Image: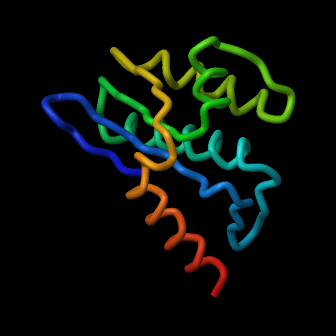
C-alpha cells in the first residue's frame, strides 16, 4: 500500500502479488481475501491519519468491481461490510482498477513484505 497526497487527494495502491499472504499468526486463503484485507487496512489507516478524500487503486479487478457496485461475496462478506461502513466516513472516496503492470511499485513493496515474513 502506498498513501500519497497529490493536490489534496490521497491515494492508496494495493497489490497482493497473486499469492497467499502469510503473517506470523495466520494465513490468507485467497488473493481476493488478501486484497480485501489490504483495502480495509488502507481505509483505516487513511481515516486515522485524518484524510477525508481518498483514491484507492488496486490491481484486483474483482474487488474493485464488488466495492463499486456495493456487491456481496460470501468469502469476504464481513470485510466488505466493514469497507462500506468505513468508506461512508470519508467526504469522498473512489475505487479504481489499475492493471498489475502499472502497479509495479506496490508489487515490489508487497514482495519485500512477504520476504520479511518468510524468513
Which quarter of the figure has residue 49?
A: top left
Q: Position of residue 3 (x, y in %)?
A: 33, 46
In the displayed image of the protein, which residue is found farthest to the left?
7
Which quarter of the figure has residue 108?
A: bottom left
In the displayed image of the protein, which residue is found farthest to the front?
101
16 in relation to 45, above or below: below
Q: 100 or 85, which lies in front? A: 100
Q: Position of residue 46 (x, y in %)?
A: 38, 38
Which quarter of the figure has residue 51?
A: top left
The residue located at (36%, 29%) in the rendering is: 55
Give the mark count: 0
In the displayed image of the protein, which residue is found farthest to the right?
74
The residue located at (40%, 21%) in the rendering is: 93
The residue located at (52%, 25%) in the rendering is: 86
The residue located at (77%, 56%) in the rendering is: 28
Q: Is residue 68 left or right of residue 29?
A: left
Q: Is residue 57 left or right of residue 31?
A: left
Q: 8 or 100, which lies in front? A: 100
Q: Position of residue 75 (x, y in %)?
A: 84, 35
Q: Position of residue 90 (x, y in %)?
A: 39, 20
Which image quadrant: the C terminus?
A: bottom right
Q: 11 or 84, which lies in front? A: 11
68 in relation to 45, above or below: above
Q: Is residue 43 left or right of residue 79?
A: left
In the displayed image of the protein, which residue is found farthest to the bottom?
119
The image's colour scheme reads rainbow
8 in relation to 99, above or below: above
38 in relation to 94, above or below: below
Amino acid at each position: 500500500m502506498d498513501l500519497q497526497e497529490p493536490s489534496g487527494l490521497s491515494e492508496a495502491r494495493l497489490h497482493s502479488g497473486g499469492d497467499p499472504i502469510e503473517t506470523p499468526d495466520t494465513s490468507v486463503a485467497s488473493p481476493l481475501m488478501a486484497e480485501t484485507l489490504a483495502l480495509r487496512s488502507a481505509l483505516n489507516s487513511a481515516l486515522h491519519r485524518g484524510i477525508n478524500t481518498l483514491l484507492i487503486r488496486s490491481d484486483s479487478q474483482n474487488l474493485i468491481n464488488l466495492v463499486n457496485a456495493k456487491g456481496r461475496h460470501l468469502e469476504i462478506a464481513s470485510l466488505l461490510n466493514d469497507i462500506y461502513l468505513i468508506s461512508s466516513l470519508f467526504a469522498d472516496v473512489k475505487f479504481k482498477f489499475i492493471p498489475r503492470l502499472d502497479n509495479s511499485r506496490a508489487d515490489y513493496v508487497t514482495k519485500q513484505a512477504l520476504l520479511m515474513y518468510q524468513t
